[in-house]
Image: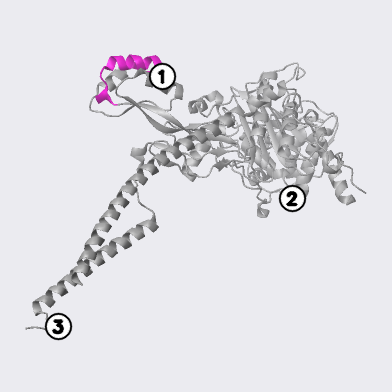
Amino acid sequence: MRRWAAAGAVTLAIGSAAVLYWISYETGRLEARVQVLDRTLDRVEADIAAARAELAHLSRPDRIAPLAQAMGLVPPTAQQFVAEDQLPRRVREQP
Amino acid sequence: MRSANGHTAAQVSSENRTVAVLLCVALAFSALALQLVWLGFKGQASARISMNEPIARAFARPDIVDRNGRLLATDLDTPSLYADPALIIDIDEATEQLAEIFPDIDQAQMRLTLADKSRRFIWIRRGLSPRVAQRVHDLGLPGLAFRREPRRTYPMGHLAGHLLGGVSVDNRGIAGLEKFIDETKGVEAVLGSKPSSKVPVRLSLDLGVQHGLEDELTAAVARYAAQGAAGIVMDAQTGEIIAAASLPAVDPAWPKQAQDPTRLDKNATGVYELGSIFKLFTIAQALDQGAARLDTVYDVRAPLRIGRHQIRDPHPAGRPLTLREVFVLSSNVGAAQMALKAGARSQQAFLSRIGLLKPARTEAGPTAKASLPARWGEIETATISFGHGLAVSPLRFVSAAASLLNGGFAVEPTLLLTGGRAPDQRSRVISGETSAALAALMRRNVTAPYGTGRRADVSGFEVGGKTGTAEIAIGGQYREDAVISSFLAMFPASGPKYVVLVMLHRPQASIESGGQITAGLNAAPTVARVIARIAPLTGVSPASVQTQFDAFRSAK
């Protein structure tokens, strides 16, 4: 009995040591991966911020207005507004 | 001595010790196992370093967006160049090569700084563009390195520059809305470049309307050779500023521009005698206090004498005028008679009640204090009735006018989106009837063939308004050739939603203005252009559409 218990305890100790070593190794590996992902995330977030700023800069009104005017577009006037029921229907209602 | 199963006492004691040790080992392992399970659930494996401000040096700021979510200001990740003097081999070479890239660098100072080997960190230039950073990198000089930092960027350029303010080299707000963000929303101290985790600050501004206003004001400055211009578009019900511009403009990326006296924000930091647009207040007071009705007649045939002063109309009507006509023909004598009947104290109390005499405060900062007369006597009462002798900031003026035209509820200007808050019923300053009468009078001034504001009409949007041409006092003397030409407008007159003020600073006579400098010939047509441009963007239905819609609903 005593021998079995001692053997079990030794096996448990060796097994635990192996598991602890594996966990420690895995933790280190995951931490390195987290750092890589964090850096990637920062870079992607910075890229997104730059892309949003660039989009806003390219769509700023003082850039779009001359382009629109060059295409013959003008600001809308009151005469271009009609109530919804005044719009011509494309499909005739079925009787 | 032996036990029943043949073991000696010593053997039993040894067995007990073994069991005890085994139990201890088992307990220790159980504790370890529990700890692992606990850590697994808690999920906080990595330690984090907390930073304080002196180490961080840079600050991440929340974005600023307009009412429709369009970006006005954001942080960008930019490289900043620093030097470690201990690692620099040839100071002269480093200085000369850096001076080629940064010509404004003080080379003598740079040599001295880099020679101090006791220092390990010196900023050379912060917030570089990628191209400049690459040029420095290509030098391959030891002892020079980059650090990533957030840097404030304004993708819309100078648009709404006066309102946005600016930031310091550490990305801290130093003026305007940027300063407001630091004081109320807060900024995050960061090491390196991390975007802010705070939600964007949503403004009441509409970029489309802001651009329309700035564009038309720029065109007006060129058309009438004015020294400057200012304009405000305000939601009459909520006090939200939809657009506000002051020319010459400033670029928020260069905060020092705003300190140039010629570029000060005329809407907030300037106070002006705004001329006849003040008659709106005089008539509001007379109507609301029951001192006059719309058809009350005033004898304006002769100039008004007060002591040694004489008040006259620039274009005398030559006949008695009703209150309506006093407004539409802009009679100074009629307005002065109204104010004198009420008295100085009553006038002061009324102007104070509508908020005109105290500075306004928006998120971009307080407006300048009104310049009150040293003595508020008879002559001052008379001149203030038509906008001389009392100087106020345009922003304060517009919010007071909005309070009179929105049904009579006091509103305070704001640059933040309020989500269409209803006016506070306890803040009534004039009756609803007076407010409606004022809107009708302003509309009449635009539709009447002899109205001073007839050039401000925009088909379909029921514009109402009042002109103001105020002579500027230079060296203590009012000069006829130097005026501030302004136009206060609102639309639609049947239920004013927006109040618009346009102010031209010292416009010159031109062909477009018929060789004159009066507001009806320069500020009024400018307002018409502004409203024609912005009304379709504000969601106001043209009158014709509203009529069709009402007819459609009643038919249903």
| Residue bearing mark 3 | B5
Boundaries of the magenta span: B84-107
State the quadrant of the N terminus of chain B: bottom left
Q: Amino acid at mark 1?
A: Arg
Q: Residue at left 30%, top 50%?
A: A24
The verdict on residue B93 being magenta is yes
The answer to which of B93 and A78 lies nearer the viewer is: B93
Q: Quadrant of residue A60?
A: top right
Q: Position of residue A85 (x, y in %)?
A: 85, 43
Q: Position of residue B376 (x, y in %)?
A: 63, 38
Residue B128 found in image quarter: top left
Label 3 sits on what residue type?
Asn
Would you call the spot at circle 3 few (<14 residues within 10 Å), some (14-19), or many (20 or more)? Answer: few
**Do the residues at discs 1 and 3 belong to one chain?**
yes
First in sequence, mark 1 or 2: give its number: 1
Measured in 3D between alpha carbons, the distance from the residue under mark 3 to the one under mark 2, in whole angstroms, is 111 Å
Which of discs 1 and 3 lies nearer the camera? The answer is 3
| Label 2: chain letter | B
- Answer with mark 3 or mark 2, whichever residue precedes in sequence: 3
- Nearer the viewer's eye, disc 1 or disc 2? 1
> Dot 2, crowdedness within 10 Å: few (<14), some or many (≥20)?
some
Crowding around mark 1 (Cα neighbors within 10 Å: few <14, some 14 to 19, many 20+) is few
Q: Secondary structure at mark 3?
A: loop
Q: Is residue B192 above or below residue B104?
A: below
